[in-house]
Amino acid sequence: MSELEAELRRVVRGEVGFDVTSRALTTMDASNYRRVPLGVVAPHDADDVAAVLEVCRDHMVPVVARGGGTSIAGQATGTGVVLDFTRHMNRLVSLDPDTRTAVVQPGLVLDRLQDAAAPHGLRFGPDPSTHSRCTLGGMIGNNSCGSHSVAWGTTADSVRELDVVTARGERLRLGQGWAGAPQGLRELVEGELARLRTGYPELPRCISGYALDALLPEKGADVARSFCGSEGTLGILTEAVVRLVEAPRARALAILAYADESAAAEAAAGLLAHGPLTVEGMAADLVPQSASAVLPSGGAWLFVETGGDSQGEARARAEAIVRAADVVGSLVVTDPGGQRALWRIREDASGTATRMPDGSEAWPGWEDCAVPPQRLGAYLRDFRALLAAHGLRGTPYGHFGDGCIHVRIDFDLLTEAGVGRFRRFSEELAEVVVAHGGSLSGEHGDGQARAELLPKMYGAPMVALFERAKGVWDPDDLLNPGMLVRPAPLDSNLRFSVLPRKPVDVAFGYPADGGDFSAAVRRCVGVAKCRTTSVAGSAVMCPSFRATGAEEHSTRGRARLLHEMLAGELVTDGWRSAEVRDALDLCLACKGCRSDCPVEVDMATYKAEFLHHHYAGRRRPAAHHSMGRLPQWLRLVARTRTASVVNALATVRPLAWMAKRLGGIAPEREIPRLAARTFSRWWERREKTPVAPGADLVILWPDTFTEHLSPSVGQAAVRVLEAAGLRVALPPTLRLRTPSGSEGVTVALDPVSLLRGRERVCCGLTYVSTGQLDRARAVLLRTLDLMEPVLETAAPVVVLEPSCAAALRSDLPELMHDDPRARRLADRVLTFAEALERLAPDWTPPRVERPAVGQTHCHQHAVLGDAPDRRLREAAGLSGELSGGCCGLAGNFGFEKGHFEVSVACAQEQVLPAVRGAQEGAVVLADGFSCRTQLEQLAGVRGRHLAEVLAERLEEQR
């Protein structure tokens, strides 16, 4: 233990982490930059902050304050000690609705303040798109703004008083009238009044540099306001008094469509006279195809929000703006749910923009320049011309009403030539911004990305004044050095420079990333949507973070550790890393990040890849054998017809305890009962139902769970599909040709089935989720051989278990990327509801006429989509919405030893409250076997597959 670490542990009540994981999680923010800290401290209170500063001052070690870590200019990274305020100093201390003020700690997430203010009809004005995870301290440090700044200004406009500890231990309370000013600051300002009165551009979004102009006497000598935007370089914030504003009782959202972004930009300034709450802009390039259908036709859009005391008043104001605007199309939405869905399109742009339409990467760096709003159209034309001159691409979006745009640009930050172009472009764009009277930063701060170029905007004398101000506050240059003054070069410390230049040898194909695992890991740019503390609507990501609150259990945290594993500087043992393994251990492989992450990070796949390499040639955990190879064991039981024996033994407590101990199963779990008769055996002996000549053929997939654990689901699906006029068949069980492929494929994975000459298809899910990818490939190759006759027909494949359907649709083609049959089979996969909608569009389901509760399966949400299921439920008279999130069992996850508490916490977030609070007579829907098992074991409730509910109603109508 180092002397620094030992001293910090002695004087700090909060956590001190100098371990590899703690450091790796804070090497990056949401910028292009990376710095490796010495350690991380989560202070418990202001006394802890003062103690950390004293120790670090004695050792001359820099200190960097960090909130949500979503800064885009690099200012939340550092080489010394990082202060993480999100763990303890995250409280709303008080809220006074009469004075419309709140007292907050720096680690408080903005949405939590909004939640507390809302019952009083109040809100905090600024609202960045990261509002669900950014902190008030980070917002004050960056002087954040958000979409409502045209109405309520920047964070600096909402700050009243700030409690700050300086690097030398002074505790100051900053406010107006020079309150809290450190010694020498007033003298410095009063000697430079002329420069301060003329040296700042006149525009609503001037965030660059220090806000020394707020100290002018005519502006109230507001030390608190001047501190905003200082990026943790002047002092450490420990508490803040902030102003709240009255929230409109009703809102309307007008979506104004224009031919292109230039037309939208030219129009934005003219709408300000109508008093809108927002004037946000984005172009079609940033809108996912799935979302474009809800927007009016056009090439770019303005999102203009209006408020009022009633919905009618808000709508009238929105419609007045539509009439005043010269648009090619428009839409006015007053429904709150519809508005939220539209705002998500805009808010996700910060992640969506990191991928160009062709899939190539794009990066921040020139993320938020601002110009006078009336100059925005001209500036964008010059900006586009400069992009073209450098052979670069980017799609601007953002706060058009404030003249502030965001953009991700396809810089090549991996090669020396590309980095050189990045520097030249940055220098030339700075000159363009200044020529239009703008600010290099209009929201996210200068950090390392732009501070080097501040002389172009302010001139050398003003930058020298900034340095003198820094010296007054922090004479030892301990607080976030290299930011704002005496900055590091903008092309140094790039996060990509440490990554391997050659593709890593991996099992999955990573088609969206050119087969490059490093590129897949680079997808995570740090916007941290995975760090949200509550889930909205049907969203899933990231249940383990919400259960633990620990960064290493977020998608971003795991991606950071994988990045460091590839870099090899902090995490030095590569695929064998215990730090990466432990962080991935609580990943439920729910795949929620695949859909909910704006850049579609697929941590479930990365986890499977890691486990495959981590355990190569090594002893695996018992759960990988007991549950990873579950299809083998269940087929063996079925072949030997010993299900009743296994069930009986599982009821004997000592035997069940021993089985769970040997199998790595959580002792709190009950072992599910096996079906006395498998689905396939029922199929072979059932009375065949006549079907009409020429009926469409569907292949019903007998997944492991339906086959051995819930055959009633398969039986119900057969009855419903046949009632809909479809002809049902099961996949072949004999190969019609000699197996081909890699060495070892013909190994007897199931000796009993080979003795009988029959084999079973399998999606390989349990092998994939436990990282047994060689075995998964063998299983999937056998499956493709069996399915070859089906692939020569036009028959679709109906899969009842959502996790198996998702595995076939995504894991199969990505793992078997060298076999063209994999994509053909993946494209045939339909869910139960999709099959009925596509193949029997004229069939009317029986009316159940009951409310429904339950949870949309996380894999269905992430990979398959649930729109057909919603329509089928509606047609059957099943009312109500299913909850989002994850049930927490997630296949083998919730059964594994050590996962029970997290599994239960995930279930208690949404699905258990929804089921326990259901009205009498409600149908509990759970299409996934894991979901049904979790409900039964934790709530004593029997969930049912939608097919079972419909089949039961068909029987009742006979």
Image (cartoon, rainbow, N blue to C red):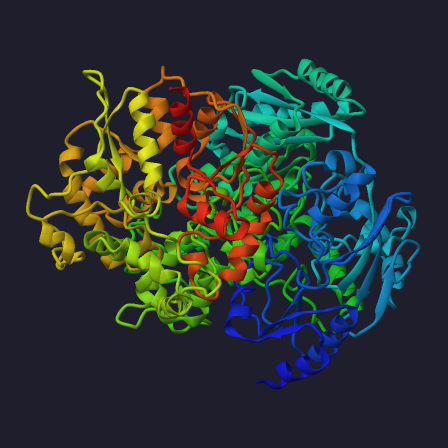
Q: Is residue 143 visible?
A: yes
Using the image as rendered, state which of residue 339 and residue 482 is in the foreground.
339
Using the image as rendered, state which of residue 209 and residue 14 is in the foreground.
14
Using the image as rendered, state which of residue 301 and residue 632 is in the foreground.
632
Considering only vertical position in the picture, is 53 above or below 550?
below
Residue occupying image coordinates x 37% and y 52%? 673
Q: Is residue 391 visible?
A: no
Image x and y of residue 7, in percent: 67, 83
Q: Residue 437 vs residue 164: left or right?
A: left
Quadrant where the C terminus sits is: top left
Using the image as rendered, state which of residue 952 and residue 16 is in the foreground.
952
Image x and y of residue 494, in percent: 49, 60
Considering only vertical position in the picture, is 138 above or below 20?
above
Residue occupying image coordinates x 63% and y 74%? 16
Residue occupying image coordinates x 70% and y 68%? 479
Image x and y of residue 638, in percent: 23, 51
Q: Residue 37 vs residue 438: left or right?
A: left
Considering only vertical position in the picture, is 396 above or below 465?
above
Which quarter of the figure has residue 841? top left
Count of numbered tags:
0
Quadrant where the N terminus sits is: bottom right
Image x and y of residue 645, in percent: 29, 58
Q: Residue 445 vs residue 390: left or right?
A: right
